[in-house]
Image: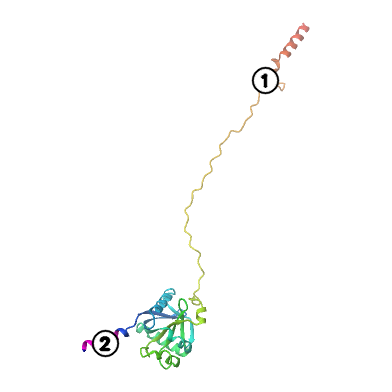
Amino acid sequence: MRQAQSLLSSKKSKASAPAWTGVITLARNMAKKTPYRAALIQGKVADVEVVLRSAAANSSVADITHRVPFDEVAKKVASGSILSLVPNSIMEQASFEEYNKYFRAKSRAGVARLDGSLALYVMPCGEDIAPLKDSLYALGPHIPRAGCLIGLIAPGTAAVNAAPATAAPVGTATASKPPKQEPQEAQPVAKEAPAEEKAPAVEAKEEEGGDGMSSKELMDLFSNPDLIQLLQKEVGEES
């Protein structure tokens, strides 16, 4: 009998154990960053993985950029995955209370866009919020009533899905820097081969005679047989 009771109690403890626990950091427009100890109390671990993957791509933060009325969130409860979000330490208690008061004062849930068509809806817990009482708390007594925020992973609204996945906070835009260029090694400058130096062409001038004729021309003249015969004839007549 005791063994049966212990077996039943162990099964109940296993059934009540959350399927996933971890830490999710929330922010509002990349400010008021607060880590929360999260537990999946109903739904799919695959949905939690979408939250973690989206946060990893956004400085490890699930950034709340929109708000929607509780009535809109209530319509998505039945098909979503539900998280409890408890302050990670006593140091985050004040931030948790500020988040809780903020959403109650606005009568709205915060929305962080995720990958694909999903969104994370963050809201205060408590059956005093009528839309949540008739939807969230109709699921059963395992949904927390106090001491935490509630996270709902469900399809996003049209306005949320149309917004950029991640937006740079105001005042943090920086001009893009040109890519750093690696210094290039100086290439040796190729020297032109020196042009061959040619001695200036100097035309050899023949030595000129006194009457303006060159010695070569004089030699050709006196070696002419006709001229020699003519000269000899003139000398014979004179004599």
> Which residue lies most toward the left here?
2
Quadrant containing the N terminus is: bottom left
Which label number is shown at residue 8? 2
Which label number is shown at residue 97? none
Q: Is residue 71 above or below residue 182?
A: below
Neighbours of disc 1 within 10 Å: few (<14), some (14-19), many (20+): few
Mark 1 → mark 2, Cα distance in angstroms: 142 Å
Q: Is residue 132 left or right of residue 211?
A: left
Q: In the image, is residue 30 part of the stretch drawn in magenta?
A: no
The location of residue 82, given as percent across then percent down, is: 40, 84
Going 48% across and 85% down the picture, which residue do you hit?
67
Quarter of the figure with residue 222: top right
For marks 1 and 2, the one nearer the N-term is: 2
Q: In the image, is residue 8 part of the stretch drawn in magenta?
A: yes
What residue does disc 1 label?
216
- The kind of residue tagged 1 is Lys
The location of residue 65, given as percent across then percent down, is: 48, 81
Q: Main secondary structure of the magenta part?
A: helix
> Which residue lies most toward the right here?
237
Going 71% across and 13% down the picture, which residue do you hit?
225
Q: Is residue 54 above or below residue 42?
A: above
- Mark 2: secondary structure: helix
For the record, the magenta segment spans 2-13
